[in-house]
């Protein structure tokens, strides 16, 4: 999993699968979309206006549950 943030456009992307995929995008809201691989698995989640949702602090807290940091 990789989480990236682009401050120029205030967008975050949570990538759950590595590789190149032809994705189908489903918009949950105007700002949040899920990208699906052809097999229906989730490739990633895009969050526009990310500072409004997850970046209220300069370095948001990321909590790992039952996972070890790499």
Image (cartoon, rainbow, N blue to C red):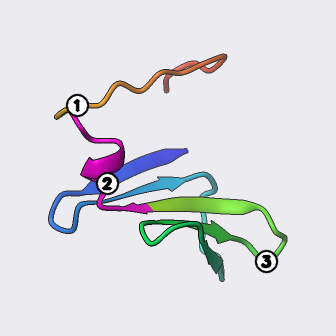
How far apart marks 3 and 1 lie (CA) works out to 34 Å
Decide: marks 3, 2 in contact (CB < 8 A)? Answer: no
Say which label, 3 or 2, has the lower sequence index: 3
Q: Is residue 67 above or below residue 39?
A: above
Residue placed at 58% from the left, 66% from the top? 28
Q: Is residue 2 above or below residue 18?
A: above
Q: Is residue 70 above or below residue 43?
A: above
How far apart marks 3 and 2 lie (CA) works out to 27 Å
Question: In which image quadrant can residue 21 be found?
Answer: bottom right
Query: For this rendering, which residue is in front, 49 or 46?
Result: 49
Bounds of the magenta span? 47-56
Q: Which residue is mark 3?
A: 38
Q: Which residue is mark 2?
A: 50
**Element at badge 3?**
loop
Q: Position of residue 26 (x, y in %)?
A: 63, 74
Residue placed at 66% from the left, 83% from the top? 22
Q: Which residue is mark 1?
A: 59
Q: Position of residue 54 (x, y in %)?
A: 35, 42
């Amino acid at each position: 999993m990789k989480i990236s943030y682009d401050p120029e456009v205030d967008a975050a992307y949570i990538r759950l699968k590595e590789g190149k995929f032809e994705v189908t995008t489903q918009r949950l809201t105007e700002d949040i979309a899920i990208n699906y691989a052809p097999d229906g698995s989730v490739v990633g989640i895009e969050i526009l206006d990310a500072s409004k949702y997850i970046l209220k602090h300069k370095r948001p807290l990321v909590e790992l549950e039952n996972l070890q940091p790499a």
